Amino acid sequence: MAWVWFHRFGSPPHFYRLAGRLTPWFAWPAALLCLAGLIGGLGMAPADYQQGDGFRIVYVHAPAAWLSLMVYVVMAGTAAVGLVWRMNVAYAVAASCAAIGASFTVVALVTGMLWGRPMWGTYWEWDPRLTSELLLLFLYLGYMGLRNSIDDVGRADRASALLAIVGVVNVPIIHYSVIWWNSLHQAPSVMKFGRPTMPASMFVPLLLMLAGFTAYFVALLLTRARGEVLRRERNAHWIAEALGQGPGCKV
Amino acid sequence: MSAQRVGFAAAAAALIVRDLRLALRRSGDTLQPLGFFLVVTTLFPLALDPEMSLLRDIAPAALWVGALLSSLLALDLLFREDAQDGTLEQLALCGLPFAGLLLAKTVVHWLLTGLPLVLIAPLAAIALGAPYAAMPGILAALLLGTVALSLIGAVGAGLTMSLKRNGSLLALLVLPLAVPVLIFGARATALAIAGEPLAAPLYLLAAMAVLAATLAPWALAAAVRIGLE
Protein backbone atom coordinates (compact mmCIF):
# COMPACT_ATOMS: atom_id res chain seq x y z
CA MET A 1 0.00 0.00 0.00
CA ALA A 2 2.71 2.40 1.01
CA TRP A 3 4.54 1.57 -2.21
CA VAL A 4 1.76 2.70 -4.51
CA TRP A 5 3.36 6.11 -5.04
CA PHE A 6 6.57 4.38 -6.04
CA HIS A 7 4.95 2.14 -8.62
CA ARG A 8 2.89 5.03 -9.96
CA PHE A 9 6.17 6.80 -10.54
CA GLY A 10 7.08 3.93 -12.85
CA SER A 11 4.12 4.55 -15.12
CA PRO A 12 5.31 6.50 -18.19
CA PRO A 13 2.24 8.80 -18.58
CA HIS A 14 2.33 9.67 -14.90
CA PHE A 15 6.05 10.35 -15.00
CA TYR A 16 5.69 12.38 -18.18
CA ARG A 17 3.06 14.66 -16.66
CA LEU A 18 4.80 14.92 -13.28
CA ALA A 19 8.19 15.71 -14.83
CA GLY A 20 6.62 18.34 -17.05
CA ARG A 21 4.97 19.97 -14.06
CA LEU A 22 8.12 19.85 -11.92
CA THR A 23 10.54 21.21 -14.53
CA PRO A 24 9.79 24.96 -14.05
CA TRP A 25 10.11 24.54 -10.28
CA PHE A 26 13.75 23.67 -10.86
CA ALA A 27 14.51 25.70 -13.97
CA TRP A 28 13.56 29.11 -12.53
CA PRO A 29 15.39 28.70 -9.20
CA ALA A 30 18.40 27.49 -11.22
CA ALA A 31 18.40 30.66 -13.31
CA LEU A 32 17.94 32.93 -10.27
CA LEU A 33 20.54 31.15 -8.13
CA CYS A 34 23.14 31.15 -10.93
CA LEU A 35 22.48 34.83 -11.63
CA ALA A 36 22.90 35.72 -7.95
CA GLY A 37 25.96 33.50 -7.67
CA LEU A 38 27.58 35.03 -10.75
CA ILE A 39 26.92 38.58 -9.57
CA GLY A 40 28.30 37.72 -6.14
CA GLY A 41 31.23 35.73 -7.45
CA LEU A 42 32.31 37.86 -10.39
CA GLY A 43 31.27 41.27 -9.10
CA MET A 44 31.23 41.42 -5.34
CA ALA A 45 33.75 38.86 -4.06
CA PRO A 46 37.24 40.30 -3.53
CA ALA A 47 40.12 39.09 -5.68
CA ASP A 48 42.23 36.35 -4.14
CA TYR A 49 45.48 37.68 -2.70
CA GLN A 50 47.52 34.95 -4.39
CA GLN A 51 45.55 34.05 -7.48
CA GLY A 52 44.06 37.47 -8.31
CA ASP A 53 40.95 37.37 -10.46
CA GLY A 54 41.91 33.97 -11.85
CA PHE A 55 40.33 32.20 -8.92
CA ARG A 56 36.87 33.31 -10.06
CA ILE A 57 36.68 30.40 -12.49
CA VAL A 58 36.05 28.30 -9.40
CA TYR A 59 32.43 29.50 -9.56
CA VAL A 60 31.96 27.44 -12.71
CA HIS A 61 34.61 24.78 -12.17
CA ALA A 62 33.66 23.53 -8.71
CA PRO A 63 29.89 23.14 -9.41
CA ALA A 64 30.64 21.36 -12.70
CA ALA A 65 33.12 19.00 -11.01
CA TRP A 66 30.67 18.31 -8.18
CA LEU A 67 27.88 17.54 -10.63
CA SER A 68 30.08 15.36 -12.83
CA LEU A 69 30.40 12.98 -9.89
CA MET A 70 26.84 13.37 -8.62
CA VAL A 71 25.33 12.66 -12.05
CA TYR A 72 27.28 9.39 -12.21
CA VAL A 73 25.88 8.36 -8.84
CA VAL A 74 22.35 9.35 -9.91
CA MET A 75 22.85 7.39 -13.13
CA ALA A 76 24.00 4.27 -11.27
CA GLY A 77 21.22 4.65 -8.69
CA THR A 78 18.41 4.95 -11.23
CA ALA A 79 19.98 2.15 -13.28
CA ALA A 80 19.96 -0.08 -10.18
CA VAL A 81 16.30 0.81 -9.54
CA GLY A 82 15.61 -0.17 -13.15
CA LEU A 83 17.40 -3.49 -12.77
CA VAL A 84 15.77 -4.38 -9.46
CA TRP A 85 12.16 -3.33 -10.18
CA ARG A 86 12.35 -3.67 -13.99
CA MET A 87 11.16 -0.10 -14.23
CA ASN A 88 11.33 1.35 -17.71
CA VAL A 89 11.09 4.96 -16.53
CA ALA A 90 14.13 4.50 -14.28
CA TYR A 91 16.11 3.24 -17.28
CA ALA A 92 14.98 6.27 -19.27
CA VAL A 93 16.25 8.57 -16.50
CA ALA A 94 19.58 6.71 -16.32
CA ALA A 95 20.00 6.91 -20.07
CA SER A 96 19.34 10.66 -19.96
CA CYS A 97 22.01 11.15 -17.30
CA ALA A 98 24.98 10.03 -19.37
CA ALA A 99 25.22 12.91 -21.85
CA ILE A 100 24.54 15.50 -19.12
CA GLY A 101 27.22 14.03 -16.85
CA ALA A 102 29.74 13.82 -19.67
CA SER A 103 29.07 17.49 -20.52
CA PHE A 104 29.62 18.58 -16.92
CA THR A 105 32.83 16.54 -16.89
CA VAL A 106 34.04 18.30 -20.04
CA VAL A 107 33.15 21.70 -18.52
CA ALA A 108 35.07 20.81 -15.34
CA LEU A 109 38.07 19.68 -17.41
CA VAL A 110 38.11 22.74 -19.66
CA THR A 111 37.69 25.23 -16.80
CA GLY A 112 40.35 23.37 -14.84
CA MET A 113 42.72 23.69 -17.78
CA LEU A 114 41.92 27.38 -18.25
CA TRP A 115 42.58 27.93 -14.55
CA GLY A 116 45.82 25.98 -14.82
CA ARG A 117 47.23 28.18 -17.59
CA PRO A 118 47.86 31.27 -15.38
CA MET A 119 48.42 29.26 -12.16
CA TRP A 120 50.65 26.43 -13.30
CA GLY A 121 51.86 28.04 -16.52
CA THR A 122 50.50 25.12 -18.53
CA TYR A 123 47.10 23.94 -19.65
CA TRP A 124 47.59 20.41 -18.52
CA GLU A 125 49.22 19.30 -15.32
CA TRP A 126 48.78 15.75 -14.07
CA ASP A 127 46.90 17.04 -11.08
CA PRO A 128 45.00 14.26 -9.28
CA ARG A 129 41.61 15.95 -9.55
CA LEU A 130 41.97 16.73 -13.24
CA THR A 131 43.27 13.22 -13.92
CA SER A 132 40.37 11.55 -12.16
CA GLU A 133 37.96 13.86 -13.99
CA LEU A 134 39.53 12.63 -17.23
CA LEU A 135 39.07 9.00 -16.18
CA LEU A 136 35.47 9.81 -15.22
CA LEU A 137 34.97 11.14 -18.75
CA PHE A 138 36.25 7.80 -20.10
CA LEU A 139 33.75 5.98 -17.88
CA TYR A 140 30.92 8.12 -19.30
CA LEU A 141 32.17 7.51 -22.84
CA GLY A 142 32.28 3.76 -22.20
CA TYR A 143 28.71 3.86 -20.89
CA MET A 144 27.49 5.76 -23.93
CA GLY A 145 29.51 3.54 -26.25
CA LEU A 146 27.97 0.40 -24.79
CA ARG A 147 24.44 1.85 -25.08
CA ASN A 148 25.03 2.88 -28.67
CA SER A 149 26.37 -0.46 -29.79
CA ILE A 150 23.36 -2.49 -28.57
CA ASP A 151 20.34 -2.13 -30.83
CA ASP A 152 17.69 -3.64 -28.58
CA VAL A 153 16.60 -0.98 -26.05
CA GLY A 154 15.82 -3.44 -23.27
CA ARG A 155 19.18 -5.15 -23.48
CA ALA A 156 21.04 -1.85 -23.82
CA ASP A 157 19.27 -0.72 -20.64
CA ARG A 158 20.24 -3.75 -18.61
CA ALA A 159 23.83 -4.04 -19.87
CA SER A 160 24.55 -0.34 -19.38
CA ALA A 161 22.89 -0.43 -15.94
CA LEU A 162 25.29 -3.17 -14.89
CA LEU A 163 28.21 -1.17 -16.26
CA ALA A 164 27.11 1.92 -14.33
CA ILE A 165 26.95 -0.09 -11.10
CA VAL A 166 30.39 -1.62 -11.72
CA GLY A 167 31.63 1.89 -12.47
CA VAL A 168 30.22 3.45 -9.32
CA VAL A 169 31.97 0.81 -7.21
CA ASN A 170 35.21 1.66 -8.99
CA VAL A 171 34.98 5.46 -8.98
CA PRO A 172 36.25 5.87 -5.38
CA ILE A 173 39.00 3.28 -5.95
CA ILE A 174 40.15 5.06 -9.10
CA HIS A 175 39.94 8.47 -7.41
CA TYR A 176 42.02 7.52 -4.38
CA SER A 177 44.58 5.54 -6.34
CA VAL A 178 45.09 8.54 -8.61
CA ILE A 179 45.59 10.78 -5.57
CA TRP A 180 48.06 8.26 -4.12
CA TRP A 181 49.89 7.98 -7.44
CA ASN A 182 50.13 11.72 -7.72
CA SER A 183 51.33 12.40 -4.20
CA LEU A 184 54.38 10.27 -5.00
CA HIS A 185 55.30 12.16 -8.12
CA GLN A 186 54.97 15.82 -7.27
CA ALA A 187 54.39 18.19 -4.43
CA PRO A 188 50.75 18.67 -3.42
CA SER A 189 48.97 20.99 -5.76
CA VAL A 190 48.16 24.55 -4.76
CA MET A 191 44.53 23.95 -5.56
CA LYS A 192 42.50 24.04 -2.37
CA PHE A 193 38.84 24.59 -3.03
CA GLY A 194 36.40 24.89 -0.19
CA ARG A 195 38.96 25.67 2.46
CA PRO A 196 37.29 26.81 5.66
CA THR A 197 39.34 30.00 5.70
CA MET A 198 37.53 31.26 2.63
CA PRO A 199 35.69 34.49 3.58
CA ALA A 200 31.91 34.54 3.35
CA SER A 201 31.94 36.99 0.45
CA MET A 202 33.74 34.33 -1.61
CA PHE A 203 32.03 31.30 -0.12
CA VAL A 204 28.36 32.32 -0.30
CA PRO A 205 28.43 32.85 -4.09
CA LEU A 206 30.05 29.42 -4.43
CA LEU A 207 27.21 27.84 -2.46
CA LEU A 208 24.68 29.72 -4.62
CA MET A 209 26.36 28.42 -7.76
CA LEU A 210 26.43 24.85 -6.39
CA ALA A 211 22.70 25.01 -5.63
CA GLY A 212 21.98 26.68 -8.96
CA PHE A 213 23.94 24.09 -10.97
CA THR A 214 22.22 21.25 -9.11
CA ALA A 215 18.77 22.70 -9.80
CA TYR A 216 19.80 23.20 -13.43
CA PHE A 217 20.81 19.56 -13.63
CA VAL A 218 17.46 18.40 -12.24
CA ALA A 219 15.54 20.57 -14.72
CA LEU A 220 17.71 19.33 -17.59
CA LEU A 221 17.36 15.72 -16.48
CA LEU A 222 13.56 15.96 -16.23
CA THR A 223 13.36 17.49 -19.70
CA ARG A 224 15.66 14.92 -21.27
CA ALA A 225 13.93 12.06 -19.48
CA ARG A 226 10.57 13.26 -20.84
CA GLY A 227 12.03 13.16 -24.32
CA GLU A 228 13.47 9.71 -23.70
CA VAL A 229 10.10 8.45 -22.39
CA LEU A 230 8.37 9.85 -25.49
CA ARG A 231 10.89 8.14 -27.75
CA ARG A 232 10.46 4.80 -26.03
CA GLU A 233 6.66 4.96 -25.83
CA ARG A 234 6.18 6.39 -29.29
CA ASN A 235 3.60 3.75 -30.21
CA ALA A 236 1.59 4.01 -26.99
CA HIS A 237 -1.92 5.47 -26.94
CA TRP A 238 -1.42 7.89 -24.08
CA ILE A 239 1.00 9.97 -26.14
CA ALA A 240 -1.77 11.02 -28.49
CA GLU A 241 -3.73 12.22 -25.47
CA ALA A 242 -0.73 13.95 -23.92
CA LEU A 243 0.43 15.69 -27.06
CA GLY A 244 -2.26 15.71 -29.67
CA GLN A 245 -5.00 18.06 -28.53
CA GLY A 246 -5.41 19.63 -31.94
CA PRO A 247 -6.96 17.74 -34.84
CA GLY A 248 -4.59 16.17 -37.30
CA CYS A 249 -1.79 15.91 -34.79
CA LYS A 250 -0.29 12.52 -35.34
CA VAL A 251 2.55 10.98 -33.39
CA MET B 1 18.50 -39.08 -19.53
CA SER B 2 21.22 -40.01 -17.13
CA ALA B 3 20.52 -39.33 -13.50
CA GLN B 4 24.13 -38.74 -12.67
CA ARG B 5 24.57 -35.71 -10.40
CA VAL B 6 27.72 -33.67 -10.85
CA GLY B 7 29.04 -31.58 -8.02
CA PHE B 8 30.21 -28.01 -8.53
CA ALA B 9 33.91 -28.79 -8.03
CA ALA B 10 33.84 -31.59 -10.59
CA ALA B 11 31.96 -29.44 -13.08
CA ALA B 12 34.34 -26.51 -12.65
CA ALA B 13 37.36 -28.79 -13.03
CA ALA B 14 35.86 -30.35 -16.15
CA LEU B 15 35.20 -26.89 -17.56
CA ILE B 16 38.79 -25.80 -16.88
CA VAL B 17 40.20 -28.96 -18.49
CA ARG B 18 37.93 -28.54 -21.52
CA ASP B 19 38.88 -24.90 -22.04
CA LEU B 20 42.57 -25.63 -21.60
CA ARG B 21 42.37 -28.49 -24.10
CA LEU B 22 40.59 -26.28 -26.62
CA ALA B 23 43.25 -23.61 -26.16
CA LEU B 24 46.11 -26.11 -26.56
CA ARG B 25 44.64 -27.35 -29.84
CA ARG B 26 44.79 -23.78 -31.10
CA SER B 27 48.15 -22.96 -29.64
CA GLY B 28 48.73 -20.28 -32.28
CA ASP B 29 45.87 -18.15 -30.99
CA THR B 30 46.87 -18.84 -27.42
CA LEU B 31 50.43 -17.66 -27.88
CA GLN B 32 49.55 -14.45 -29.68
CA PRO B 33 49.10 -12.26 -26.56
CA LEU B 34 52.52 -13.36 -25.34
CA GLY B 35 54.16 -12.47 -28.62
CA PHE B 36 52.30 -9.18 -28.51
CA PHE B 37 53.65 -8.47 -25.01
CA LEU B 38 57.24 -9.13 -26.11
CA VAL B 39 56.88 -7.00 -29.24
CA VAL B 40 55.37 -4.07 -27.34
CA THR B 41 58.09 -4.09 -24.69
CA THR B 42 60.68 -4.25 -27.48
CA LEU B 43 59.21 -1.16 -29.12
CA PHE B 44 60.01 1.07 -26.16
CA PRO B 45 63.82 0.86 -26.45
CA LEU B 46 63.50 1.36 -30.21
CA ALA B 47 61.32 4.45 -29.81
CA LEU B 48 63.55 5.85 -27.05
CA ASP B 49 67.29 5.68 -26.61
CA PRO B 50 68.78 2.26 -25.95
CA GLU B 51 70.49 3.80 -22.95
CA MET B 52 70.11 1.51 -19.92
CA SER B 53 69.52 4.17 -17.26
CA LEU B 54 66.70 5.65 -19.32
CA LEU B 55 65.21 2.23 -20.04
CA ARG B 56 65.31 1.32 -16.37
CA ASP B 57 63.17 4.39 -15.65
CA ILE B 58 60.50 3.46 -18.17
CA ALA B 59 60.66 -0.32 -17.56
CA PRO B 60 57.66 -0.34 -15.12
CA ALA B 61 55.54 1.63 -17.58
CA ALA B 62 56.51 -0.59 -20.52
CA LEU B 63 55.92 -3.83 -18.60
CA TRP B 64 52.52 -2.81 -17.21
CA VAL B 65 51.12 -1.15 -20.31
CA GLY B 66 52.20 -4.24 -22.23
CA ALA B 67 50.58 -6.54 -19.67
CA LEU B 68 47.35 -4.53 -19.72
CA LEU B 69 47.08 -4.53 -23.51
CA SER B 70 47.98 -8.18 -23.97
CA SER B 71 45.43 -9.23 -21.34
CA LEU B 72 42.88 -7.20 -23.31
CA LEU B 73 43.75 -9.02 -26.55
CA ALA B 74 42.62 -12.43 -25.38
CA LEU B 75 39.44 -11.13 -23.72
CA ASP B 76 37.58 -10.74 -26.97
CA LEU B 77 37.45 -14.51 -27.46
CA LEU B 78 36.82 -15.40 -23.81
CA PHE B 79 33.05 -15.91 -24.10
CA ARG B 80 32.31 -15.32 -27.77
CA GLU B 81 32.37 -18.86 -29.15
CA ASP B 82 30.68 -20.38 -26.12
CA ALA B 83 27.95 -17.77 -26.44
CA GLN B 84 27.46 -18.55 -30.13
CA ASP B 85 27.32 -22.34 -29.87
CA GLY B 86 25.04 -22.34 -26.82
CA THR B 87 27.54 -23.64 -24.27
CA LEU B 88 26.99 -20.66 -22.00
CA GLU B 89 23.22 -21.16 -22.08
CA GLN B 90 23.68 -24.76 -20.97
CA LEU B 91 25.97 -23.59 -18.18
CA ALA B 92 23.39 -21.02 -17.10
CA LEU B 93 20.64 -23.66 -17.05
CA CYS B 94 22.52 -26.57 -15.49
CA GLY B 95 21.61 -25.63 -11.94
CA LEU B 96 25.14 -25.17 -10.67
CA PRO B 97 26.27 -21.71 -9.48
CA PHE B 98 26.68 -19.75 -12.70
CA ALA B 99 29.03 -17.18 -11.15
CA GLY B 100 31.33 -20.00 -10.05
CA LEU B 101 31.39 -21.63 -13.49
CA LEU B 102 32.22 -18.30 -15.11
CA LEU B 103 34.92 -17.79 -12.51
CA ALA B 104 36.38 -21.12 -13.68
CA LYS B 105 36.44 -19.79 -17.25
CA THR B 106 38.16 -16.65 -15.98
CA VAL B 107 40.75 -18.83 -14.24
CA VAL B 108 41.47 -20.40 -17.63
CA HIS B 109 41.92 -16.96 -19.12
CA TRP B 110 44.44 -16.16 -16.41
CA LEU B 111 46.24 -19.51 -16.87
CA LEU B 112 46.55 -18.81 -20.60
CA THR B 113 47.48 -15.11 -20.55
CA GLY B 114 48.35 -14.01 -17.00
CA LEU B 115 50.56 -16.85 -15.90
CA PRO B 116 52.65 -17.16 -19.12
CA LEU B 117 53.07 -13.39 -19.03
CA VAL B 118 54.42 -13.59 -15.49
CA LEU B 119 56.80 -16.34 -16.59
CA ILE B 120 58.06 -14.45 -19.64
CA ALA B 121 58.23 -11.05 -17.94
CA PRO B 122 61.76 -11.52 -16.53
CA LEU B 123 63.00 -11.71 -20.12
CA ALA B 124 61.43 -8.37 -20.97
CA ALA B 125 62.46 -6.87 -17.63
CA ILE B 126 66.11 -7.80 -18.12
CA ALA B 127 66.02 -6.43 -21.65
CA LEU B 128 64.77 -3.16 -20.16
CA GLY B 129 67.67 -3.01 -17.73
CA ALA B 130 66.05 -4.24 -14.52
CA PRO B 131 68.55 -5.80 -12.10
CA TYR B 132 68.25 -9.51 -11.24
CA ALA B 133 67.55 -8.67 -7.62
CA ALA B 134 64.32 -6.98 -8.69
CA MET B 135 62.84 -10.14 -10.24
CA PRO B 136 60.98 -11.51 -7.18
CA GLY B 137 59.24 -8.16 -6.66
CA ILE B 138 58.36 -7.77 -10.33
CA LEU B 139 57.01 -11.33 -10.49
CA ALA B 140 54.92 -10.91 -7.33
CA ALA B 141 53.45 -7.64 -8.60
CA LEU B 142 52.62 -9.13 -12.00
CA LEU B 143 51.18 -12.28 -10.41
CA LEU B 144 48.73 -10.26 -8.30
CA GLY B 145 48.07 -7.66 -10.98
CA THR B 146 47.25 -10.12 -13.76
CA VAL B 147 44.72 -11.87 -11.52
CA ALA B 148 42.90 -8.57 -10.99
CA LEU B 149 43.18 -7.70 -14.70
CA SER B 150 41.68 -11.03 -15.79
CA LEU B 151 38.74 -10.61 -13.41
CA ILE B 152 38.04 -6.98 -14.34
CA GLY B 153 38.44 -7.76 -18.02
CA ALA B 154 36.09 -10.73 -17.85
CA VAL B 155 33.23 -8.43 -16.76
CA GLY B 156 33.87 -6.25 -19.81
CA ALA B 157 34.05 -9.33 -22.04
CA GLY B 158 30.73 -10.55 -20.62
CA LEU B 159 29.08 -7.19 -21.34
CA THR B 160 30.31 -7.07 -24.94
CA MET B 161 30.26 -10.76 -25.89
CA SER B 162 27.14 -10.56 -28.04
CA LEU B 163 28.15 -7.43 -29.95
CA LYS B 164 29.47 -7.72 -33.48
CA ARG B 165 32.40 -5.35 -33.33
CA ASN B 166 33.61 -5.02 -29.77
CA GLY B 167 37.39 -4.66 -29.80
CA SER B 168 37.69 -0.93 -29.23
CA LEU B 169 34.59 -0.73 -27.04
CA LEU B 170 35.99 -3.45 -24.79
CA ALA B 171 39.17 -1.41 -24.39
CA LEU B 172 37.15 1.71 -23.56
CA LEU B 173 35.16 -0.18 -20.92
CA VAL B 174 38.00 -2.09 -19.29
CA LEU B 175 41.00 0.24 -19.36
CA PRO B 176 39.62 3.00 -17.06
CA LEU B 177 38.61 0.33 -14.54
CA ALA B 178 42.11 -1.16 -14.71
CA VAL B 179 43.83 2.14 -13.88
CA PRO B 180 44.30 1.39 -10.13
CA VAL B 181 45.96 -1.95 -10.95
CA LEU B 182 48.24 -0.18 -13.42
CA ILE B 183 49.19 2.51 -10.89
CA PHE B 184 50.03 0.16 -8.02
CA GLY B 185 51.62 -2.47 -10.26
CA ALA B 186 53.91 0.02 -11.94
CA ARG B 187 54.74 1.56 -8.57
CA ALA B 188 55.66 -1.82 -7.09
CA THR B 189 57.80 -2.57 -10.13
CA ALA B 190 59.57 0.78 -9.90
CA LEU B 191 60.30 0.19 -6.20
CA ALA B 192 61.60 -3.29 -6.95
CA ILE B 193 63.95 -1.95 -9.63
CA ALA B 194 65.16 0.77 -7.28
CA GLY B 195 65.78 -1.88 -4.61
CA GLU B 196 63.41 -0.33 -2.08
CA PRO B 197 60.79 -2.09 0.07
CA LEU B 198 57.64 -2.63 -1.97
CA ALA B 199 55.25 -4.18 0.54
CA ALA B 200 52.75 -1.29 0.48
CA PRO B 201 51.83 -1.38 -3.23
CA LEU B 202 51.94 -5.19 -3.17
CA TYR B 203 49.41 -5.29 -0.33
CA LEU B 204 47.19 -2.88 -2.24
CA LEU B 205 47.50 -5.01 -5.38
CA ALA B 206 46.56 -8.07 -3.34
CA ALA B 207 43.59 -6.20 -1.87
CA MET B 208 42.42 -5.30 -5.36
CA ALA B 209 42.82 -8.89 -6.57
CA VAL B 210 40.79 -10.16 -3.60
CA LEU B 211 38.11 -7.49 -4.07
CA ALA B 212 37.88 -8.30 -7.77
CA ALA B 213 37.69 -12.04 -7.03
CA THR B 214 34.86 -11.37 -4.58
CA LEU B 215 32.71 -9.02 -6.65
CA ALA B 216 33.58 -9.67 -10.28
CA PRO B 217 31.98 -13.16 -10.56
CA TRP B 218 28.55 -11.77 -9.60
CA ALA B 219 28.82 -8.86 -12.01
CA LEU B 220 30.11 -11.30 -14.63
CA ALA B 221 27.19 -13.70 -14.15
CA ALA B 222 24.72 -10.80 -14.43
CA ALA B 223 26.48 -9.49 -17.55
CA VAL B 224 26.50 -12.87 -19.29
CA ARG B 225 22.84 -13.49 -18.43
CA ILE B 226 21.94 -10.13 -20.00
CA GLY B 227 24.02 -11.05 -23.04
CA LEU B 228 22.26 -14.40 -23.41
CA GLU B 229 18.73 -12.95 -23.43
Image: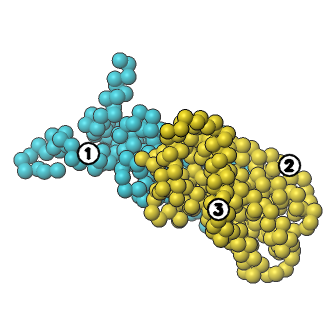
Chain colours: A cyan, B yellow
The amino acid type of the residue labelled 1 equals: Glu
| Left or right: A9 in relation to B46 | left
- Position above or below: B150 against B62: above
Residues marked 3 and 1, same chain: no
- Image spot of residue B8 (x, y percent): 64, 38
Letter of the chain that mark 1 sits on in the rendering: A
| Left or right: B193 in relation to B210 | right
Query: Is A226 or B228 nearer to us in this picture?
Result: B228
- Image spot of residue B194 (x, y percent): 89, 62
Say few, some or many: other residues with alpha carbon within 10 Å of mark 1 (under 14 / 14 to 19 / 20 or more). Answer: some
Query: Is A152 or A89 nearer to us in this picture?
Result: A152
Letter of the chain that mark 2 sits on in the rendering: B
Q: Circle 2 is placed at which residue position? A: B199
- Which image quadrant for residue A52? bottom right
- Image spot of residue B76 (x, y percent): 56, 61
Task: Looking at this view, name the residue that lies furthest to the left.
Answer: A247
Marks 3 and 2, how far apart at CA: 35 Å
Q: Earlier in the sequence, mark 3 or mark 2?
A: 3
| Left or right: B49 in relation to A105 | right
Name which residue lies at 76% across and 49% down.
Answer: B205
Q: Quadrant of the N terminus of chain A?
A: top left
The amino acid type of the residue labelled 3 equals: Ala
Front: mark 3 or 1 = 3
For mark 1, give the secondary structure: loop
Query: Is B38 or B173 nearer to us in this picture?
Result: B38
Letter of the chain that mark 3 sits on in the rendering: B
Asked if one can make out residue A182 in the rendered structure from this viewpoint, the answer is no
Q: Which mark is residue A233?
A: 1
Marks 2 and 1, how far apart at CA: 56 Å
For mark 2, give the secondary structure: helix
Q: Circle 3 is placed at which residue position? A: B23
Name which residue lies at 53% across and 55% down.
Answer: B82
